[in-house]
Image: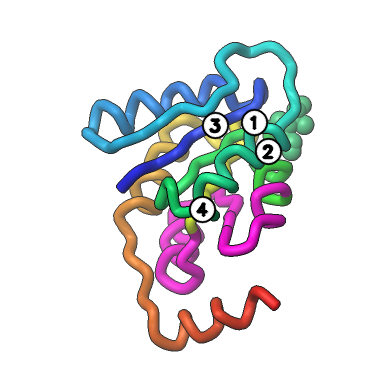
Amino acid sequence: MKIAIASDHGGFELKNKIYKYLSDNNYTVEDFGTYNDESCDYPIYAKKVAKLVQEGNFERGILICGTGLGMQITANRFKKVRAVCVSDCYSAKMSRLHNNSNILTLGQRVIGFGLALDIVQTWLDTKFEGERHQKRIDMIDV
Ligand code: RB5
C-alpha cells in the first residue's frame, strides 16, 4: 500500500512522527511537505495529496494540520476522495469499514502523539466491508 503524507506548519511535528513510524514499520510512505515549521497554507498540501489519491497514484493519504479540519474540507472537494477527520480509534475503524475512507486527517493541536499513532494503525489495518456500504458510497458523487 502506497501512502502519501503531508502537513502544514500546524501539523509538521506530528507528520514527522507518523512518517517515521510508518517507515520504521516498513510501509511505503512519501512525504509531500511541508518541510519546516514556517507558516504556510494548508490547502496547498491537502490538494497535492488529494489529487494523488484521486488519480490512483497513492491508495491512501494522511494529512495533518492544527485541527485536521482545513485538510478535511479541502481534500473532500476532490471526487473519489473520502477524507475523515478523526480523533478516536472507533471512528477511524468505522470510517474504513463503512465509508472506505482513503484520506485520514488529524489535528496536531487536538490529540496526543500516542493516540495519533494508534489511530493511524487502526485506520491502516481495517478493511472496507463493501456490499451495502459500496452502494451508499456510489450515491455520494453526483
Ligand atoms: C494554522 O494556524 C491552522 O489554521 C491550520 O493548521 C488548520 O488547523 C486549519 O484547519
Residues at discs 3 and 1 in contact (Cβ within 8 Å): no
Q: Is mark 1 within 8 Å of ligand 1?
A: yes
Q: Quadrant of residue 43?
A: top right
In front: label 4 or label 2: 4
Task: Report the residue marked by disc 2.
Answer: 67
Task: Report the residue marked by disc 4.
Answer: 55
Mark 4–mark 2 Cα distance, whole angstroms, equals 26 Å
Task: Report the residue marked by disc 1.
Answer: 109
N-terminal-most mark, 4 or 2: 4
N-terminal-most mark, 2 or 3: 3
What segment is highlighted magenta in the picture?
74-101
| Percent position of residue 133, x then y | 47, 81
N-terminal-most mark, 1 or 4: 4
Task: Report the residue marked by disc 3.
Answer: 6
Mark 1–mark 4 Cα distance, whole angstroms, equals 30 Å
Mark 2–mark 3 Cα distance, whole angstroms, equals 14 Å
